[in-house]
Amino acid sequence: MSAPSMQPGAGGIVETTDQLVSEHSFRIVLWVGISLCLVASVVRSYIRYVCFGKLLVEDYLMIGAFLTLVAIVALLLKFLGDVYWMLDVQNGRIMPGPDLFKRMETSLRAVGLISILTVIGIWTIKMNFLLFFYRLGHQIKLYLIFWWVAVALTIACGAAALGMIPYHCHFRDAQYIMQTCGSNDGINHVYTVYKASVSVDVCSDVIILCFPIIILWRTRIGLRQKLVLSSIFSLVGFTIAVTIVRGSIFGGMYKSLEQVDRKVMDTSWMEFWYIVQYVTSFVVACLVSFRSLWAHREQKSKDRSEKERLAARLRAEQQQMKQKSAQSSQEHSLRVKLNKLHDSVLDTFRDLEGTSLNGGDDFIFLDNRPASSIMLAGEFMPDGHDVNWSTTSKTRVDNESQVDSLRSLTRD
């Protein structure tokens, strides 16, 4: 949220800190950010739909978060000129005209609406994370209890962040804003609330970050998977760092209000970091949706090995049939090559989503059997305690039947 920086009195405008991002550069960042999120959203939605045949609840949340970002970017592109015009007036680069109050009200209302949408969008992304982690361990009682506590705290933090926006300093008339929000007490209040909202944002991120930390270091996934996930979630740490930077080290922003040469942070710089935080959070949320990152591979009993062997044989036969079909048709046609590339990419993403017949991956949210009869991928078991899988003839028969059915369908 951004604070109006008006001070009562003749020429009552408080100077801002040096301009750190130009209007042209800001517009470029907006277009690049929305483009990245568009690509991430389309790719994520397409992959999830192809792999599952439908979109899950968290997918709709991410679509909603993207549409919210579209609204934010549209508002910024439309009113960014007014925001920078106000900064020029504050710093004496241009003289205000008779439309000062009108343009000030326009820019502040736009920034206020952007602040509301930004909080809603960022907390929508946070809820996406929570729903994703729910699917990873809801069968475990202690995990589920902690998840509900995290949900309650995150929602409370979101409500607090919305409640701390200084609405009266954005949506009232210009004279009221200059008299009330531009006074020393008014600026002190707004900046105190601003810092509190940053703390709330960071706390909610830390709560959510507890889930991957627990899963990473209390489960038996491979070292490579741990390193990959650690790298991805270091980006979440980056979003936390962005939030802290946005709220705490903006030089003159928190100078004593008793100083004669006091300055306030310019609105454009704060909005810039809001966009950086939003885009980073969105892209990270799309990256971690690949469920096989959370899978663990172990040497199962003979029924698992048998399933792997049958699946490999089926894939080999399917590949041979595809090759023969391609050779009999137009071997070098662009369409055939594109189809091959498309199928290859989809096979890769099916593996990433855990929907292929690989037999070696176990996901917490894919098995609905009672917890007492299965070993969960994210079960919090001490190191060295393994669960033995029994081998039955019925399992082999089921596997053979499944492969035969798939083979017959492929041939047809």
Image (cartoon, rainbow, N blue to C red):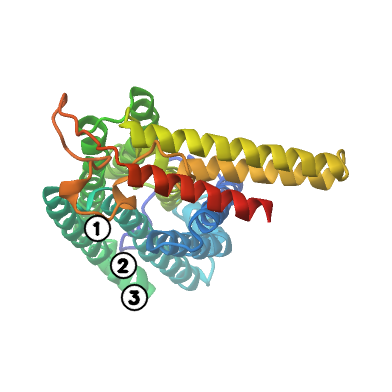
Q: Which residue is mark 3?
A: 172
Point 31% across, 40% down: residue:
240
Nearer to the camera, 331 or 214: 331
Q: Is residue 140 left or right of residue 239?
A: left
**Cα distance between the residues tagged 2 and 3:** 6 Å
Residue 148: x %, y % from top left: 16, 58
Amino acid type at image mark 3: Arg
Rendered view: 2 above or below 252 = below
Residue situated in front as seen by the camera: 364 or 182: 364
Q: Position of residue 259 (x, y in %)?
A: 24, 42
Precedes in sequence: disc 1 or disc 2: 2
Question: Dots 2 and 3: beta carbons under 8 Å?
Answer: yes
Helix, strand or loop at mark 3: loop
Which image quarter is the N terminus in?
Answer: bottom left
Horizontal and vertical percent for residue 411?
A: 68, 51
Q: Residue at x 42, y 34 (%)?
A: 306
Q: Disc 1, disc 3: CB below 8 Å?
A: no
In this view, the residue farthest toward the bottom is: 173
Q: Answer yes or no: is residue 283 visible.
A: no
Provide the residue designation for mark 2: 169
**Which dot marks residue 42?**
none
Tell me whether circle 1 and circle 2 mark residues in contact (CB < 8 Å). yes
